[in-house]
Image (tube, helix red, strand yellow):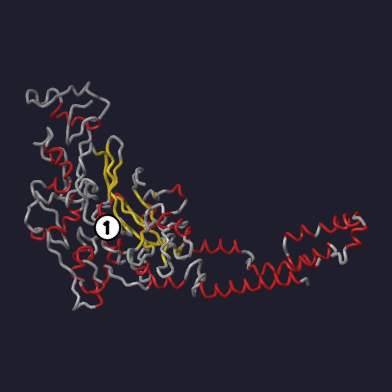
Amino acid sequence: MPQQVTRLLVAFALVGAALLIARYFLVPDTFGELGHYRAAAVDSIRNLQKSYAGRQECALCHGDVEAVRSASNHRGVSCEVCHGPAAQHVANPMEVKPVIDRRRTLCTICHAYNPSRPTGFPQIDPVAHNPQTPCIACHRPHAPEPPSTPEECGACHGQIARQKAVSHHAALPCTTCHQVPEEHKTSPRTVQPTRPTERAFCGTCHGEPAMAGSGIPQVDMRTHGERYLCWQCHYPHFPEVGR
Amino acid sequence: MKKKEVTGMTVDSGMTQDPGTTVDSGMKRDPETTETMEKEVDRRAFLRACGLAAPVILAVLKVPEGLIGQEAIEGAEREALLYAMGVDVQKCIGCGRCAVACKTENRVPPEEHFFNTWIERYVIYSDGRVVVDSPNGGIDGFPELPEEGETLRTFFVPKLCNHCQNPPCVQVCPVGATFITEDGAVLVDEEYCIGCRYCVQACPYGARWIHPEKHVAAKCTFCYQRLDEGLVPACVEVCPTGARLFGQLGNRANPLERFRRFNEIQVLKAHLNTEPKVLYANLDGEVR
């Protein structure tokens, strides 16, 4: 074999060996066992400490509270939402006690009125709704009951109540147009209030002969937009003359 | 023909046709030049040697046979085990409890701008403007809507790492410190990450951040430390309205499958082909 080829081969062998040795020291253990990563990293992440115990753990000792809560409107609300992370309390029940926050500010995190919240979620205006009184003076947090106050609809339907309050319909109670079953307060989505279904309902006030001379705007129901339902052009909670 | 059995390569079967032509061309060669070469290697002998050497070279280069086939089978088996999260946008009340729980569970620094999950408020005005804000990730609530015009609609959208099945962040990692596990969670190896921030740039969802003390990439792990014990991620555990759901794709006995059956499912930035595993229901078309 020519000398230059031999030298070249020796050089290649040396570089190759150097690379293999470097690889042996640089590539960490367990790298590539499961993929292009350290398999040991999965275990180290899996063994991280937990802070939240989960509601099943709470129920093991606090079965009485759990029985009440799981049948109430707060059945979807986990214990640790209000009482904070409880993994340490589970591990050491006597020494570490979870927080019990009795302030109004805890409840208003969810129940203060916010227009971006979905319609029907119970909301109040913390400034107008019994200021200075703790929520738990009237509502039981583990089984909250909706209040039975005169403004009961506005407690949840704040946006509608606010708009209606400055409209021509301000004086009309919600029950003029909606019949509200009592169950709607406890199961707002499954039991829904009624709504007017036909033009004639609006016509009882706004039809031509009905309330003549009362100052209520009136139209001839036979010719005024007869192909449409009234609320397709007029918003009943804030009625304006339609376009 | 023994050669063909040994190698079994398609390249060789093509080469075996050559000798016929080689012999012809060899015959036409100028006799003088043939004589001047001391030791001419016959072309047939050269090809035979190549054929015999091929399996040795391939074995050294470690090209496992049937690699593609194996991967396809693994993919099909893995499908049933993938973790995924469902988010019902219509149920989110923007209370920010998920972001708080996440920071506690995963020891995320309390400062603003470090979030594994956060809530965005979308406000769409009647003139078509879309304003998105997320003050402190929604943890301290949202300020009143600015009076900038008539609001057409407004809602909250919880955001987090989408745990893409085809993750761009994993693709760009130069050292293999971020990866997708066999059950579909995209994780970061803190000990191996060099903090180059390439993955932060690559993530189209803005889900990654650099830990201010450890100087490594950090992100949502689906609370991987909780999953083995059958617990759900902390954000799902504390969501008071059930806007978040967690489960395994393909496992019919979990709430996520019911969620997928009963809702029209959308994912964020589907056109990027990242195949997210955070599935949204009732998602507004303006959400990016």
Residue pictured at 73% horizontal, 72% vertical: A6
Q: Which residue is mark 1?
A: B112
Front-most of A175 and B116? B116
Residue pictured at 17% horizontal, 29% vertical: A240
The picture quadrant where one finds residue B242 is bottom left
Circle 1 Cα neighbour tier, 10 Å, few/some/many (<14 / 14–19 / ≥20):
few
Front-most of A72 and A235? A235
Where residue A125 sits in the image (x, y, percent)?
13, 49
Where residue B98 sits in the image (x, y, percent)?
28, 59
Q: Give the structural element (helix, strand or loop) at label 1.
A: loop
Front-most of B73 and B103? B103
**Side (left or right) of A6 relative to A150:** right
Q: Is residue A18 above or below residue B245?
A: below
**Residue found at the very far right of the displayed protein:** B31
**Side (left or right) of B272 relative to B88:** right
Where residue A104 sits in the image (x, y, percent)?
12, 58
Q: Amino acid at mark 1?
A: Glu
